[in-house]
Amino acid sequence: MPRLTAETPFIHPDCEVTESTLGGWVEIGKGSRVHRSTIGDYSYCDRYADIANATVGKFSNISSFTRIGPTDHPMEQPALHHFVYRAYDYWDDAERDEAFFAARHARRVTMIISFNETTIGHDTWIGHGAIIRPELTIGHGAVIAAGAVVTHDVPDYTIVTGVPAKPLRRRFSPAIAERLLALAWWDWSHEALRAALSDFQQCSVEAFLERHGG
């Protein structure tokens, strides 16, 4: 039997998954944290990924030690330290700053906006140790290079690298990218994916599109 199933995510030891929704065939690597996030079908993260306040798309490949949606601190106030908004941890008569936490939780990372409507992301690759700041959109088929720090939206099928991350090149020509978006293979059924598996493995992108009507 396959290790991954539609019914139960495969969660490795020492993970912390809270207030999150995991799709079918999802795998969460050892020691990872997933908080207030949605992970789409077939996506996975490798060891010690930290994902918070994020909507991650289908078929997303998230490498080890990545950080998606890191929290921030109140830089406009006199002190950066979290005693300002977590005062209840330090004093019995102090309260949690609910407004600060509400604003933080609202700053979600969306790993895709599709050509039709806002949706979970598809077919992205987030390299080892990359960081993606909150409130960003990472396009379909985009690649974030290892160690990159992403501070701006990334278009569909674009490779970015560096600190801060900048476009390196497109994965495919605009015409091919448009055909892949129209084909939307990430929405195929599990059975249809299996039927086309040899084409995914062996065909060039052009041949794949021709064979499957994209």
Image (cartoon, rainbow, N blue to C red):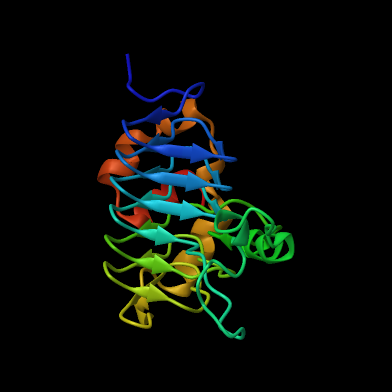
Q: Nearer the viewer, residue 20 or 150?
A: 20
Residue 101 lies, with reference to residue 189, above or below; the image says: below
Q: Nearer the viewer, residue 168 or 130?
A: 130
Q: Nearer the viewer, residue 187 or 112?
A: 112
**Which image quadrant is residue 84 in?**
bottom right
Residue at 26%, 60% in the rendered image = 128
Residue 4 lies left or right of residue 178; in this view the side is: left
Q: Quadrant of the N terminus?
A: top left
Q: Is residue 113 visible?
A: no
Residue 79 lies, with reference to residue 90, above or below; the image says: below
Rendering coords of residue 44 (x, y %): 39, 42
Residue at 68%, 61% in the rendered image = 106
Rendering coords of residue 90 (x, y %): 55, 58
Rendering coords of residue 38 (x, y %): 57, 45
Residue at 52%, 50% in the rendered image = 57
Residue 66 lies left or right of residue 193; in this view the side is: left
Rendering coords of residue 61 (x, y %): 36, 50
Q: Is residue 180 visible?
A: yes
